[in-house]
Amino acid sequence: MAADTNRPPFEQPLLEIEKEIDLLLSNANRSKDDDSRLAELQGRHAARLGEIYASLAPWDIVSRVARHPRRPQSTDYLRRICSDFCQLHGDRHFGDDPAILTGFARIGKFKVMVVAHRKGRDTSERMLCNFGCAHPEGYRKALKNMRLAEKFGLPVVTLVDTPGAYPGLGAEERGQAEAIAFNLREMSRLRTPIVSVVIGEGGSGGALGIAVADRVGMMRFSWYSVISPEGCAAILWKQARPDTNLAAAEALHLTAEQNLRLGTIDEIVDEPVGGAHRDHEKAADILQHWIIDKITELKRFKIENLVRRRYERVRAMGVVAEAAAPS
């Protein structure tokens, strides 16, 4: 196993096992006993890896897994799960935003409209895409093409992966908050099935602007919250340090399991053992099957019932019940 410069510190217990595995693999004259030992070590490695990732702290999930440099992005998934992809550009008001990727595609047997955040891989691409932080024209482009999907009776599939909407002066001048709010309203009553998945980061309104859906899933090691841990720490403790970031991540309840308990998502989409960054092909296969299953399920509903249930689902978010005061 090759050395990984991006390796998180919590994987240190695996190093000794991996060294022994590498030693056996490099031996061209392995005996049957060596092969048995190799199989045993690989089993131990997989089991230990699963144990480590099953007990990760929220801050580790955010900083080490959801933001891992090799974690699959929307373009990685679309390349693997979509065929006949035809990208659509522009919002017909201002321009095109590379941070939002939209287009017609086929996933399995279904023709769909895809809307996805795009982060970029290398430095130049990331700067072009504002690191996945969309401008208002990105959200307007997304809604324009969702309405096109509605016109042709196509399901909408959205892949969410953003630390938040772009907070620059130009974006605010062009109506960032209004564009997101308008999307929330219009998506809640769009007359076509909508499936949304948080594949990495789900930051605040920037994520929610394309995530009002009939079925919302989260990849197991993604995060979804009203604010990033660093942003929360900077507000509450005036400084974003390792200790305050950790405390904020704990308080925000941003992991997939916590969001499922809170009811902000419907399902957790599993990942390969050790995270999606370890096996892009398997992660894409799991995601594709989940999307196809959800579209198949939603196609059974009458569109009037689908829209009503979606609207009620959105309105119910944030509702709490307070215990009666003791008499």
Image (tube, rainbow, N blue to C red):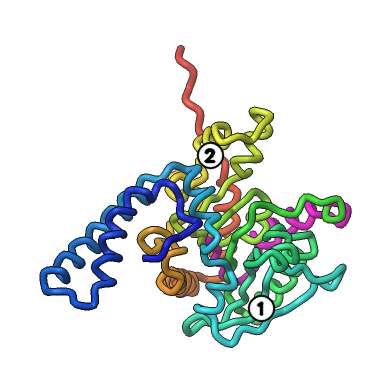
Amino acid residing under circle 2? Ala
Residue designated by label 2: 249
Pick whichever of labels 1 and 2 is earlier in the sequence.
Answer: 1
Quadrant holding the N terminus:
bottom left
Q: Residue 127, position in %: x, y?
A: 74, 62
| Mark drawn on residue 103 | 1
Is 8 left or right of 227, judged from the image as shown?
Answer: left
Distance between the alpha carbons at the discs numbered 1 and 2: 34 Å
- Please, which residue is most extreme toward the left here? 33
Where residue 60 appears, as percent x and y from the top left, is 47, 45
- 162 relative to 69 in the view: left or right: right
Report the front residue among 283 and 18.
18
* Res. 179 image quadrant: bottom right
Query: Of the numbered discs in the image, which one, if any, rests on residue 83?
Result: none
Q: Which residue is drawn at 31% across and 59% down?
A: 18
**Magenta stretch in the rendered image:** 172-199
Q: Is residue 247 magenta?
A: no
Picture coordinates of residue 210 (x, y %)?
65, 61
- The residue depicted at 87 percent of the width and 68 percent of the height is 94
